[in-house]
Image (cartoon, rainbow, N blue to C red):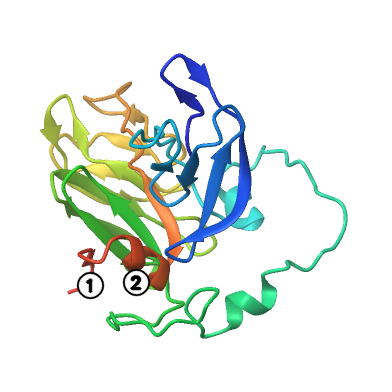
Amino acid sequence: MYARQVGDRTLTFGVSGMLFRDGLVMYDRETDTLWTHVDGRAIKGSLAGRTLEIVPAIHATWKEWKALYPESQVLKKSGEFRSPYFDYNRSGKAGILGRPLRDKRLAAKERIVGVRSADAAMAFPEKAVRDARLVQTNVGSLPVVLVAPEKGMPIVTFDRRVDNRVLEFGLGAGPPPALVDEETSSRWRITDGEAVDGPLKGRRLSRAPAYPAFWFGWVGYFPSTDLWTRR
């Protein structure tokens, strides 16, 4: 997800119908510049070289979202119930063209959460994160924590820095489940990252940019990516 503001202009986007490294390419209607959807870069046109600002988001099923935000409403789309990507998601082929995958650290269609910083990229296999329930590490210069405390809840990713201090976290008992930092024993809501109890009450963790992706798509854009493995 990206902000549409570039400089002093608000852009509107459409789908170009083209692919770049097996990924969708957007265009903006104001300048006809082409943009990649994986990293938000303008790759051709008058705005080439600019990058869209990332808006952190959560990828979740409706059931998972409701587990985290039970009062949510949804705009229901009418029409065909089955996704047009139903067969594609279950195919072992990597990408539209079915090119062979050179990096075989994971299966081509393994679902991962990708995290980028200014100086690194790391892929976190979804299943491994859910099994661990809480993962904390550094993606280059960015200290992150990924948390999925209960079955049926989405994976949420936070920056672990608060007031120029890097915190270490554990899971606090619920309900609802929460993060508890080891330094002050403050309790942090997973829904919005706010500390609701303890010495850091009122502080808030920032969401870290996290991208749901297939392994082949992520490694196609970031061939030097690290891969998190549970020790």
In the image, residue 40 sits, relative to residue 225, either above or below, namely above
Secondary structure under the numbered disc 2 in the rendered image: helix
Mark 1 lies on residue: 230
Name which residue type carries label 1.
Answer: Arg
User: Position of 161 compared to 40: left or right?
Assistant: left
Residue 156 visible at all: no
Q: Quadrant of residue 49?
A: top left
* Image position, residue 10 (x, y; %): 54, 21
Say which mark, if any, is on residue 18.
none
Seen from this angle, which residue lies furthest right? 79
In the image, residue 133 sits, relative to residue 145, either above or below, namely below
Measure the alpha-carbon separation of dots 2 and 1.
Answer: 7 Å
Position of the C terminus by quadrant: bottom left
Residue 31 visible at all: yes
Name which residue type carries label 2.
Answer: Ala
Question: In the depicted view, which residue is nearer to us: 74 or 122?
Answer: 122
Q: Tell me the residue at 49%/55% (across/down).
A: 154
Q: Tell me the residue at 45%/63% (across/down).
A: 213
Say which mark, if any, is on residue 128.
2
* Image position, residue 146 (x, y; %): 32, 53
Question: In the depicted view, which residue is nearer to us: 174 or 140?
Answer: 140
Q: Earlier in the sequence, mark 2 or mark 1?
A: 2
* Image position, residue 113 (x, y; %): 38, 60
Q: Quadrant of residue 159?
A: top left
* Crowd class of label 2 (few under 14; some 14 to 19; many from 20; radius 10 Å): some
In the image, residue 23 sits, relative to residue 119, either above or below, namely below
User: Position of 29 compared to 180: left or right?
Assistant: right
Q: Tell me the residue at 41%/34% (across/down).
A: 52
Question: In the depicted view, which residue is nearer to us: 98 or 149?
Answer: 98
Secondary structure under the numbered disc 1 in the rendered image: loop
Mark 2 and mark 1 in contact? Answer it, CB < 8 Å: yes
Question: In the depicted view, which residue is nearer to us: 162 or 77?
Answer: 77
